[in-house]
Image (cartoon, rainbow, N blue to C red):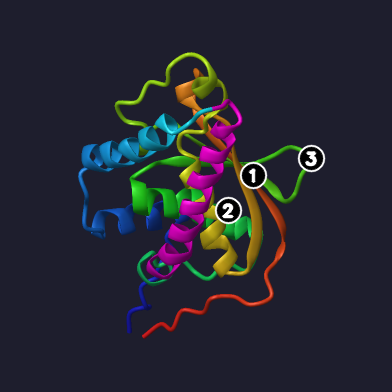
Amino acid sequence: MAAPARTTAASPAQLGEAAFDSNVKVSAEFFALTYGALVQQMAEELSQEDDVELVNQQLYNMGHRIGARLIEEYSVRSGAAPCRSFTQAAEGVALVGLRMFLGVSAELTQVKDSADTFAISFHDNPLALFVELPDGTLKEHLWYSNLLCGVITGALSLVGFQAEARFSRDKLRGDAKNEIVLHFKGRERETFQVERS
């Protein structure tokens, strides 16, 4: 009698790639232009320098609501195991979620001297296609893709993790790569449960 075949658990990056391949695709150009029009409209309504931070907050809040809705699709379609630790949650965001929803390959590194802070680095950002920020207030203060930070914290909050996500580097500001710092702040009391069939 032959020994049963051994199955190898897929890595988070493999899960993200498989989920991306199985998703219905939306044109990256259409997505970027639609998002760009939204940000442009917000920027055109600026009357004072302080308003840039208001735009950053509005983008974050929109993302938070989107993340709270995307977590169910992630849980059902990604094939990833439930996150028991913040490290697993950070891996799920960086290696599975960004790849699954945006086609972005990211790297995750633990921030030195902090067990609960991670850096998510990526070069390609489909939200920022065709974008060039003008010199001045917008380039210095606008986090153009701040929606992503909101999506991440919104999704994590529904699976029990209070987190802070913020951009620390942005290619639109002249940095070599994009980087989001993800910091664990505590556990949520009530969490979202996905019923698996």
User: Residue 115: image x %, image y %?
Assistant: 75, 49
* Kind of residue at badge 1: Phe
Which residue is at 47% across, 52% downward? 63
Comes first in the chain, label 3 or label 2: 2
Q: Secondary structure at mark 1?
A: strand
Q: Is residue 57 above or below residue 48?
A: below
The residue lying furthest to the right in this view is: 113
Q: Is residue 43 above or below residue 158?
A: above
Q: CA distance from mark 3 to mark 2?
A: 17 Å
Q: CA distance from mark 1 to mark 3?
A: 11 Å
Quadrant of res 71: bottom left
Q: Is residue 55 left or right of residue 22?
A: right
Of the pair 87 and 6, the residue shown nearer to us:
87
Asked if the residue at tag 1 contacts the one at tag 2, i.e. Cβ–Cβ closer than 8 Å, the answer is: yes
Q: Is residue 125 visible?
A: no
User: Residue 186: image x %, image y %?
Assistant: 73, 62
Residue 113 bears which disc, if any? 3
Comes first in the chain, label 1 or label 3: 3
Give the extent of the magenta segment.
48-74
